[in-house]
Image (cartoon, rainbow, N blue to C red):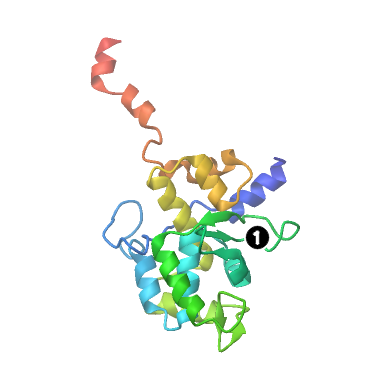
Amino acid sequence: MPRNARQSFENEHPAGRALAPLADRSRGDAESSSDRGGAAGLFDSALKVHIKTAIYLMIGTAARVGAVLELTWDRVNFDRGTINLRTSELGPRKGRAIVPMNSELRAVLQTAKAAALTEHVIEWAGEPVASIKTGFNAAVKAAGLEGVTPHVLRHTAAVHMVEGGVPMAEVAQYLGHSNEALTFRVYGRYSPTHLRKAADVLSFSRLRAV
């Protein structure tokens, strides 16, 4: 990949903060206590159903907010349990993938589908939603968080996949990345096995044997 393209990728995927996943408020390692557990607090603090649904989608699919707002019901396949984040084979594909839905996200989407008035998954008052900035920022403030943007949720999803031992190739595919090496550059340090071999080599038992 050309240097300018690589730099653009790294600027867009900073190795910054990550929130705890929606189902786990107890973990306390790399990030501050206010950030860990933040995704659940963020969800609970969202006052509008469409904001809650969007948060669940961004966490459960690792999608960018634009892909979530463009998602239509014809690309949510409940029979196969998949979500197609691509608008078309010829349309926007950057960072977009076809991903499976977990049981929690399925339940959220089934509830949303039952109440749907438009073809868009994220809707409000019978209309597609162009932006969730106001509602999302209100939820961030109510949850006592700072500096959390929708893109932080994509980063959160990636971090927790890597922390959970998901192979880097699968994480790259989930994120819609075409280059696994760049995915590793950003998220490799979150792997439970990152630098493990190097640490083992430095054990006293090995050093005494040298």
- Residue 89 in percent (x, y) is at 72, 56
- Mark 1 element type: loop
Q: Is residue 81 above or below residue 116?
A: above
- Residue 118 in percent (x, y) is at 61, 81
Task: Determine crowd level at label 1: few under 14, some 14-19, many 20+ residues with C-alpha closer than 10 A.
Answer: many
What residue is drawn where x is 33% and y is 64%? Answer: 37
Residue tagged 1: 86
Q: Is residue 39 above or below residue 180?
A: below
Left or right of residue 75, residue 59 in this image = left
Instruction: Work out whether residue 24 or residue 102 is closer to the camera in this orientation and state it.
Output: 102
What residue is drawn where x is 54% and y is 55%? Answer: 99
- Residue 115 visible in this rendered orientation of the protein: yes
- Residue 144 visible in this rendered orientation of the protein: no
Quadrant location, the C terminus: top left
Left or right of residue 94, residue 181 in this image = left
Instruction: Work out whether residue 75 or residue 49 is closer to the camera in this orientation and state it.
Output: 75
Please, which residue is most extreme toward the bottom here? 125
- Residue 81 in percent (x, y) is at 49, 59
Q: Identify the amino acid type marked 1.
A: Arg
- Residue 53 in percent (x, y) is at 47, 73
Q: Is residue 26 above or below residue 194?
A: below
Query: In the picture, residue 35 is in which quadrant?
Result: bottom left
Left or right of residue 120, residue 45 in this image = left
What residue is drawn where x is 68% and y is 64%? Answer: 87
Please, which residue is most extreme toward the front here? 79
Please, which residue is most extreme toward the top here? 210
